[in-house]
Image (cartoon, rainbow, N blue to C red):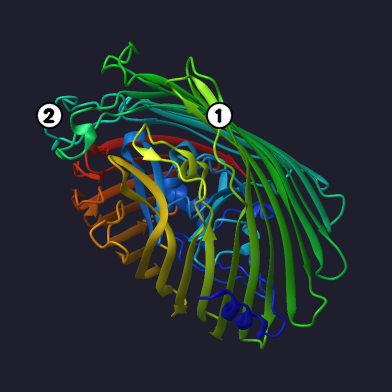
Amino acid sequence: MCKTAFFVLIMMIPGWGKAQNQESNRVVSDSVTPAFFQLGEVRITAFRKSVIKDRISQVAMEAHNKVEVSRSLNLLAGVNLTASGPRNESMVSVRGFDLRAVPVYMDGIPVYVPYDGYVDLARFTTFDLSAIDVSRGFSSLLYGPNSLGGAINLISKKPSEKMEYDGSLGMINTNGYRGNLNIGSNLGKYYFQAGYSYLHRDSYRMASGFTTRPYEDGGERDNSYRTDQMISFKAGWTPNERQEYVLGYRFQKGEKGTPVYVGDDPMNPLYTKPRFWQWPDWDKETYYFLSNTRLKGKDYIKSRMYYDTFKNILNSYDDASYTAQTKAYAFQSLYDDYTYGGSVEFGTAVIPKNLLKFSVHYKRDIHREHNSNEPVRNFKDNTGSFAVENTYAVTEKLTFIPGIGYSIRKNDTAEDYNSTTQMVSDFEKTGASNAWNGQLGVFYNFKENQKASFTLAHKTRFATIKDRYSYRMGTAIPNPGLKPEKAVNYDLSYSGVFFKALSTQFSVYYSHLTDAILSVNNVEPGKSQMQNTGSAEFMGMEITFKYDFREKLSLGGNYSYIERRNTTNPTVLFTDIPDTKVFFYTQYKPIQPIQWLVSTEFNASRNSTSYGTRAADFTLVNTAVSARVWRYMSVEAGINNVFDKNYMLVEGYPEEGRNFFVTLRVFKK
C-alpha cells in the first residue's frame, strides 16, 4: 500500500490517532494471577474493555510446567516453537515472523540483543512473571520501532498484600534441579518485589529411538548442559492514587553447551565440519525507571527509561573434548554490548468519545565484538520514533482504532577488521534509514460476549547490525545500505462465549512482505549478500476453544494453519515452521485439592534448510498431577514426552526424550 493512500485512509477516520489494545481469551487459561504489574503493560486501550491480545497467565504456565518463555508461548495458536540448532537457542515464530520482526520486551522495555535483534528465550525463565502478552500484526505502535509482525511483552509481578511470597524446589531427570523465591510487600504508598531463580541441567536424555552417530552415542546428550540464574528487584512509590513511580533491576546469568549436529544432510556444512561450541557467559543486566502520572480526567503521562548491558563469550574448540583451541576454526568470541533509551507516552480524552495517545521513543545500541588477540570493533546505532494512536468510540458497540508512526535509524560507528593487516577501519558511511507505520482496527461487539474485528497494519523492520555488517565467517559481503523490510498485515477475527462455558475464537489473516531482507548467493564467486530483494506472503487461520464443565473438568486447545510463499524465488523455501500445529489439553479436578492435566501437541513436518531438508512431524503427550497438601503448599509431579518420541525442531538436533519432574511449591497471598 502506498504511503499517500494509507495516510488518506487514516485521515478520513473521525478523531484519528488513538489506540486500543487487544485482550481476548485465546490463552490456555484465562485465570490471571492477582500479582499483576499493570505499569508493565503496553496497551491499545478502549474505554470499556480491552480487545484482541493473547495473554498467558502465571496459572497456565505453572499448570503446564513451562519454565521457559519460549515453551510457554508455544501454548498459543499461531505461535510456533523454533530453534537455532547450531547456537542452541530457543525462539518462537508468530504467524510466520521470527523474533527480529516480533521484538521481545520486559515490562515494555526492549530486551532483544542489539547485534542481531534476536534473544534466546531459553535464557528467560517464567519464575518471576505474572503474564506474557502477545500481539500479532496489529500491535500497539506505542511499543516503538520494528514490530513488523507483532510484539511479545513479559510482565513481572506486583504485590497487593503486606507480605506475600511464592517459591519452589524441584528435580528434573537427569541431574537437573530448579528453585525460585519471590517476595513482595505492599504498604500502601510503597511496595517492593524481589525474586531469585536457579535452573540447572547437567544434560538431557535422548529418546530411545535415536540411532547412534559419530558424535552422539545416545543416552545423555553430549554438551547439552545449561545453568541459568536470575535476580530481580523493583521498588514502587504511589504517593496518591494518580501517581506511580518504579525503580527496577534485573540480572540474568547463563551458561550453556551446544550439542553437535547429528543429522543426515550431506549438503549441510556441519555434516563434515562439526562445531564444538560452548558459551561460558550469557549475561544480561537491566536498570529501569517507570512512571505513570494521571492528570485531569483520563489524561496521563507515562515514561520508561532503561540502561541494559549484554555480555557474551563463545568458545569454539578443536574437538569433542572441549579443551584445546589450536585448529584454524577454533576461537574465542566476545561481545560487550550496552543499550540505553526511553519513551514518553501522553494520553488525553479531551475530544469526546476519543482517547488519543502520543509516544516518543529513543534507543541507542552499542555493539562491541572481537575474537581473543584481536582489536575490538565498535558499532553504534541510534533509533528514534514517534507514534499517534486513537480509540474512537463511534457507538456503544462500534470502535475505530487508527494509528500512525514514524521511525528513523542512523548509524554513528561501524568498524571493519582486516585479519591480514590486523587493522581496524571504518565501513562506508550511509544515510539515515526511515520508515512510516500505520494501522486501522475496527471492533464491533454484537453482545456482551460476542465480538468481531478487522485490522489492517502497515509495519516495518530496520536491518540489524548483523544484517548490514556481518561477513558471516568469511562467506558473505556486508551491505550497510539495507532498507527496512515492509509488511501489510490483515486480520479478521471473531470471539464468543456460548452457554456460559464455551469460549471460542476464530481468526484468518494475510501478510504481504516487500523489501524483505534475504541472502542472495554468488554476488561474488562463493559469497552471498543480504539484499532487499524479497517479496513474500503469509496466510493462515487459527481456532481456539475452552470449555469448562461443572468446575471439575476443563477442555481446551487450538489449531493453527499457515502457508508461506516466497513470491520472489519460490525455489528458496521458508524454514523452521510447520504448516499445521494442533494443541489440546484436559484438566480434571476429581476432588478439590487434586488436579490432573494431560496435553498433546501435533506438529507437521517443517523445512530445516532453504533447499528442502526437513524435520519430520511429531506428536507429544505430557501429563502432570498437582495436590494441595497444605494451605500454603502443593506438590506436583509429571512426565513430559510420555511416549519417548524421538523428534526434532531442526534436522540434526534431536530434542529431549521422556523426562520426569517433581516440584514442591510454597505460597502465601
Q: Position of residue 512 (x, y in %)?
A: 41, 69
Spatial CA span between label 2 and label 1: 48 Å
**Nearest to N terminus: mark 2 or mark 1:** 2
Tell me if residue 666 comes above or below residue 560 in the rendering. Answer: above
**Residue at x-position 37% and y-position 32%:** 473
Q: For the residue labelled by badge 1, is the local secondary structure a helix, a strand or a loop?
A: strand
- Residue 190 seen by the camera: yes
In terms of depth relative to the viewer, which is nearer, 541 or 98? 98
Residues at discs 2 and 1 in contact (Cβ within 8 Å)? no
Q: Is residue 55 left or right of residue 360?
A: left
Q: Quadrant of the C terminus?
A: top right
Q: Position of residue 647 (x, y in %)?
A: 21, 44
Tell me if residue 550 comes above or below residue 62 in the rendering. Answer: below
Q: Is residue 238 left or right of residue 14?
A: right
Q: Position of residue 247 (x, y in %)?
A: 75, 40
**Residue at x-position 58% and y-position 53%:** 33
Residue 318 quadrant: top left
- Residue 53 seen by the camera: no
Q: In this figure, which residue is indicated by the disc labeled 2?
A: 212
In terms of depth relative to the viewer, which is nearer, 647 or 403? 403
Q: In this figure, which residue is indicated by the disc labeled 1?
A: 425
Tell me if residue 191 comes above or below residue 370 in the rendering. Answer: below
Q: For the residue labelled by badge 2, is the local secondary structure a helix, a strand or a loop?
A: loop
Mark 1 closeness class: few <14, some 14–19, many ≥20 residues within 10 Å: few
